[in-house]
Image: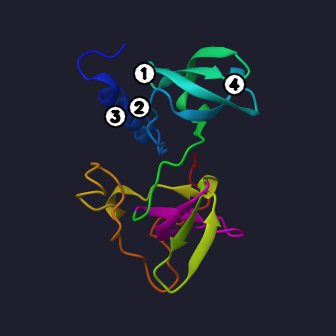
Amino acid sequence: RVVGGGACAAAASAAAAAAAAGRRFTPLRTGMKVAAKYGGGAKYYPGVITRDNGDGTYAIKYDDGDTEDAVKRPLIRTEEPTWSEGHSVEVREAGTGRYLLGVITRHNRGTFDVDFGDGRVERRVGPERMREPPARERGPEGVGGEEGAASPTAKVGGASGLSEVDSPSQSET
């Protein structure tokens, strides 16, 4: 149970726990479509978040009717877009695994067009190849009034568009 802060405090605490562990996760909310590794297994199954437990775990009702009460955040991936036009994101480059900093220019049916600021735009980028940029790449105001949201004016590093954290060994969600 969350005391005194509601869902916002729970999302913040889950995000803080993930950051402390060196991983970045998108905060989840009740009703969000997700896929999770049922029983901690290897395969993801579609479902819906039914409760944020406030301790970095979530209750999930799977599409086949099964439920779990305490699924850890690293075992859950979002199945709905959490970004919109104007958000800065890092996109994993195929082949190298490096991340390139860009800005979303279009959202279409679950994929995104991303402008890397060097004249190159990649179309139909799936969310599984995207992540939030590090905090130092985000603007203080965010987008659409959301505190902590990525800035659409985040600086793209050099002509290659590589961000300063281009390490394929970094954890992903």
Q: Which numbered disc covers residue 12?
A: 3
What residue is shown at x 60% (from left), y 67% (from top)? 98
Q: Earlier in the sequence, mark 3 or mark 1?
A: 3
Determine the secondary structure under disc 2.
helix
What percent of the width, then of the height, locates residue 156? 42, 76
What residue is shown at x 44% (from left), y 18% (from top)? 53
Q: Earlier in the sequence, mark 1 or mark 2?
A: 2
Bin the neighbour count of mark 4 within 10 Å (Cα to Cα): few under 14, some 14-19, many 20 and up.
few
Q: Which numbered disc covers residue 13?
A: none
Tag 3–tag 2 contact (CB < 8 Å): yes
Instruction: Give the amino acid type for the residue marked by disc 3 in the picture.
Output: Ala
What residue is shown at x 41% (from left), y 42% (from top)? 19
Tag 1–tag 2 contact (CB < 8 Å): yes
Look at mark 1 in the image and give the residue it sits on: 55
Bin the neighbour count of mark 2 within 10 Å (Cα to Cα): few under 14, some 14-19, many 20 and up.
many
Look at mark 2 in the image and give the residue it sits on: 14
Q: Earlier in the sequence, mark 1 or mark 4?
A: 1
Instruction: Give the amino acid type for the residue marked by disc 1 in the picture.
Output: Asp
Determine the secondary structure under disc 4.
loop
Tell whether 36 sits left or right of 154: right
The magenta region covers 87-109
Which of the colour schemes (rainbow, by chain, secondary structure, one colour) is used?
rainbow
Look at mark 4 in the image and give the residue it sits on: 63
Tell whether 172 sits left or right of 52: right
Q: Nearer the viewer, residue 65 or 27?
A: 65
